[in-house]
Amino acid sequence: MTSSPARAYPLTRPSVRQYIFSPQLLLRPSIRLKTSLYVLSITIILLVILALNAATSGPSTGQEVDVNTVPSHDSPADSGEGKDVAKGKDAHLVDEEIQRSFEEPDFSLLSSVQPHEIGCDVPLEGREKERGVLMFLGIFSAADKRERRDLYRQVIIPDFPPDQFTVKFILGTPPYPENPISQEAVARSRLMNKVEAEMNEFGDMVMLPMIDNIDLGKTHEYFKWVAKEYSGPGRVQGRPRFVMKADDDTILVMPNLISGFKDLNCAENIYWGTSAGRSHYFGDYFRGLAYAMSWPLVSWIGNADMPLAHIIKIEDARTGQWLRHLDPVTDPVKRIDMGWTMGDWNQLDVGVETVALHWLKLDDWVKQQHQRLLDIWADDNRPYDIENGVSPKISIQKGKETPESAQKEHQRQKDLGWDVGGNLD
């Protein structure tokens, strides 16, 4: 007689009633294993639900916003040091270290393709796929400056013919709150949703993949974007001959920009702006209210993978530092200094020779000073258009004369003790 194989437990499963009246059944190994798996599964599901709830706690707009995500590639803002600088925690950069960073060479600039090898073949006429523009004008803005952008769209930008200028507002992302589910995070999410809608409506904005801070390397990130946007062999549609960076409290006199740039050779290393009123603490550079460079320089700078120390702080002086890396024999820089035809509006002798007005902090000042320019040109019987700009030679000569109001401001700064080591004109 053969016996059946021995079994550790009967095949029949105890009923619920048996578990209730015989709780020792729960101690069976198979039951303990199943219970542990059930508990672990439920715990994982709850954690996933909580994580999804936290991630979507902001207001729903029914549409995903790409610009509301953390930049997908490394930028200065992604490093711990970059985040500290963006929040103003730059005590780790003492004056001596900042000064040294302006004096030491940058290997990426020295070793990359140099401007004379890049060239500039940008026709303004001919086939559309090969045609470029005279200038790319980047107006530095911020996410929360919608009213100022709308004012410029209404008053300033209509002056600039689109076949000669590509005009864009240049923004970075607002800082990320430390607490991702705080009220600050909700406010940031709402702001970014508004910015996304504005970008879709006007198509005249560029969102750089970095925290918006002028001292965090925004200018280099801007040149990097332009260099990448219009990169490619041969002629590229829309490529600019010149690239300008301007503040959003600056009015540029369009006819004088046309006359000043139309006859320049963009294959040369053109560096255009004003040194009037600058600090001399960081060497030779043009003030950040508005300055321009030719395409080879922008491509060279924009393609350089520089360390954080060589792109942060005092953006206009940084640009001057980058240009000092060029070989004066093979890549001489042609500096065009417009002097006192560019500057703070309350320090200039404004006339038809004026090229740019700065420090227009109030919206009413933008409207008033723009109308003032139009009136001055009308009084001179000169149409405010692309055909009637003042000769740059006349503006440059005018710019050599320091206005009386600028002299008074200079003296005031010296009286305040700002003229440290002769760092003012």
Image (cartoon, rainbow, N blue to C red):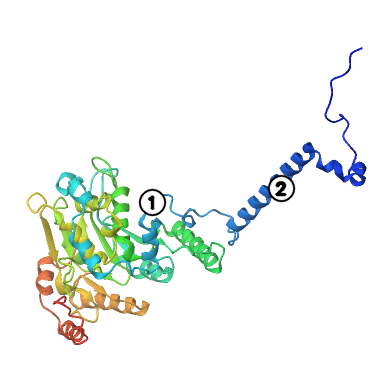
* Residue marked by disc 2: 42
Task: Please give the label number shown on residue 74.
Answer: 1
Left or right: where does residue 190 sit relative to residue 102?
right
Give the percent coordinates (x, y) of residue 259.
17, 62
Front residue of this view, candidates 11 and 332 = 11
Query: Disc 2 or disc 1, which is closer to the eye?
Result: 2
Assign the N terminus to one quadrant of the image. top right
Front residue of this view, candidates 106 and 67 = 106
At horizontal 27% and vertical 42% (from top left) the residue drawn is 232
First in sequence, mark 2 or 1: give its number. 2
Which amino acid lies under the numbered mark 1 shown in the image of this protein? Asp
* Above or below, 371 relative to 259: below
Q: Describe the element under mark 2 as helix, strand or loop.
A: helix
Give the percent coordinates (x, y) of residue 51.
61, 54
Left or right: where does residue 400 sit relative to residue 137?
left
At horizontal 31% and vertical 79% (from top left) the residue drawn is 368
Give the percent coordinates (x, y) of residue 211.
40, 61
Residue 92 in which image quadrant: bottom left
